[in-house]
Amino acid sequence: MSEPLTLGVAGLGTVGMGLIQLLNAHAARLEKMLGRPIVVTGVSARNRDKARGEGFGSARWFDDPVALAKDPSNAVFVELIGGEDGPAKAAIEAALEAKKHVVTANKALLAKHGIALAKKAEAQGVSLNFEAAVAGGIPIIKMLREALAANGVKRVYGILNGTCNFILTKMTDENRGFSEALKEAQELGYAEADPSFDIGGFDAAHKLSLLVSLAFGTTIAFDQIHVEGIETIATADIEAATELGYCIKLLGVAVDTEQGVEARVSPVLVAEESALAEVSGVTNCVGIDGDFAGNLLLVGPGAGAKPTASAVASDIVDIARGLVMPPFIRSTSVLEPARGLDLKSRLGNYYVRLSVYDRPGAMAAITKRMGDENVSLESIVQKRPGPVHPGQAAEPRPGAAEAAVNVILITHDTTEDAMRKALRAIEKDGHVKERPQMIRIEDL
Ligand code: HSE
């Protein structure tokens, strides 16, 4: 039997404890498979006294994750602290400087410092593995690195945030309110410590930026990704989308074109018969268009203790087998900076919800503004106002706020630039009560 592979694990939250549970449950199986045991020799977390319900064997406690990262008792440093800077970054840097392999699930840190840390790992001849950073339990990094290594990839997309997908699914299937669904996602351990990372689309954008580098061989600055979250999705949008045969999803899409890389995270409408519409709850999916392999869609749990721990453990298994690869599949020296592409030129169709004052000429003015920008409409649906009860006046009383009704438009193919110009003009005309809601429709 060879030497044990020794681990220092920093961060004992949802994922950290999931990893400890996995390593305890599968210790004998992994030892048999790898010909060597995996032993946690040190752990670190913010609160030593918290009851965690899982044994750490003879692992030593470290108050300071950087001290754990430097300690010679472990050969692999596993960072599960989170945070794009601070202790997580300091500890990873210390581990790489000490020529240790590093495994992390920290997409926020990698989106910001991944290339610099990868350079350091390459220079030291060690691994920086991050399978758990993208789409939780879906082995997308190993898929790109191994099975699809010989393909050219021109598009990668996916439902990359379990919390958002869980919220949108609850809103659609159970008519739940946004806050109630978010609270439930947090209680189940899906959401980030700061849930605005999830609902604002930033967590998905962090993952998309890593996918861009892995799939296209380019680096992309975070601000080259257009990011919109799900906070603006109203029950009225969910209802209208359902009635029109669509489903709302938060989608990350990156396309490598001759003109540059288009990368965006935003809510989109997908047809209810699309495979993406079937991806519900905390489930994620990642689609890859490979030039030889064809179009692939991987579906699986994107968050939660066990799936994420499974991904972290798979990185540890690679190290136990002696596999050392460049973190971004090819050497950082050949990664080229992506030229960002302005979304203005995106061609596609759009869903628009307007809260229109119920007055003569309003609709004519709206359709005129669309026509002025050459936007052709596929459908217009004016929703009925709320029910008028017996004895209640149908017309507003003098002095009462003017009534507005939801009008839903679906456009034919047009550019995003034209849509934005038309909606700005509609807003200026003063026939709408609120900012227009515009959601891209994705033919996926
Ligand atoms: N908060 C993330 C999500 C966890 O909801 O997908 C996994 O990255």
Image (cartoon, helix red, strand yellow):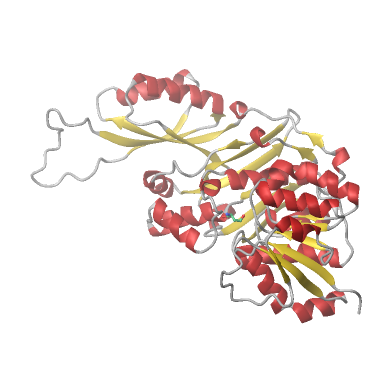
* Residue shown at 53% from the left, 35% from the top: 349
Depicted 145 relative to depicted 55: above or below: above
At x 53% / y 59%, what residue is drawn?
A: 280
The picture places residue 185, in percent across and down from the top left corner, at 49, 59
> As drawn, is 359 to the left or to the right of 438?
left
In the image, is residue 348 above or below residue 180?
A: above
- Using the rendered image of the protein, determine whether residue 148 is visible from the camera's viewpoint: no
Quarter, ligand 1: bottom right
Query: Looking at the rendering, which quadrant does residue 162 occupy?
Result: bottom right
Name the quadrant of the N terminus: bottom right
Q: Nearer the viewer, residue 53 or 179?
A: 53
Residue drawn where x is 78% and y is 52% of the image: 144
Query: Quick one: 249 or 205, which is closer to the camera?
Result: 205
* Residue 344 visible: yes
- The location of residue 214, given as percent across then percent down, is 77, 46
**Residue shown at the point (91%, 52%) measured from the top left:** 125
